[in-house]
Image (cartoon, helix red, strand yellow):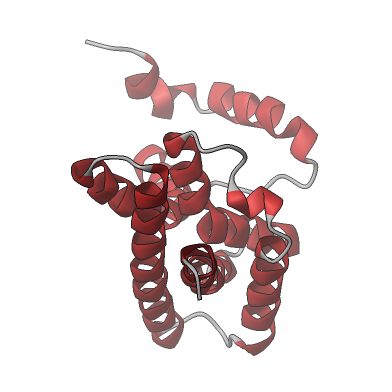
Amino acid sequence: MDALDAFRLVDLLGVAPGAASGALAARRQDSFDLVGVLGLAFACGLGGGLLRDLLLNAGTPVALTDALYLPTVIAAAIVVSVIAGEPGPRVLRAVSILDALAVGFFAVASALKAKQVGVTVPAMLLIGVLGGSGGALLRDVARLLMEETGLPVIVADDPLTCVVRGCGKALENMEKLSTIFTSD
């Protein structure tokens, strides 16, 4: 097995649990439908790798050029949606286990890709950390936004109007958001 095959294997081994973790996290939210589950699965399964590839400036991100990445995310999201029960402690434990697997595989794959590109050892470590944690970071952004603003984060039925809806919600809740929009 050459270095490219090893990278691909380790990266895909990170994509599957990362996507499954995102799908499980989405299933915990009442506002997420199938599109929301797939969206969070894509963010968690591919987010760290996309961030890694963009930071390394090594051409088009591999998740967009390799035919196995998107089907891996979709398969993981479907499997989780079919077998996952009601949200509870078991689902939270499963998310933690899947996160640990994904972070480990993504960190190794990101460091391998950084080495292949030829960056310094400290840069390899940084890319490994960012690649390993990128998907989980994207998953938790929605939760953090809800906690900090007190506003629900909802996946829009029509993605083309989500910015307009978001601006409308911000204007409706200007009192709650006044600390965000103003500085002292």
In the rendered view, does 24 fall on the left or right side of 108?
A: right
The residue under the point 65% across, 67% down is 73
Image: 173 above or below 147:
above
Front residue of this view, candidates 2 and 73: 2
Residue 33 in view (yes/no):
no
Front residue of this view, candidates 108 and 95: 108
Residue that protrudes farthest toward the front in the picture: 2
Front residue of this view, candidates 98 and 34: 98
Residue 98 in view (yes/no):
yes
The residue under the point 73% across, 61% down is 67
Coordinates of residue 137 in the picture (x, y in percent): 39, 51
In the rendered view, does 10 fall on the left or right side of 129?
A: right
The residue under the point 34% across, 50% down is 115
Coordinates of residue 176 in the picture (x, y in percent): 41, 29
Image: 106 above or below 175:
below
Coordinates of residue 22 in the picture (x, y in percent): 53, 65
The residue under the point 29% across, 52% down is 129
Q: Quadrant of the C terminus?
A: top left
Coordinates of residue 58 in the picture (x, y in percent): 51, 38
Image: 148 above or below 136:
above
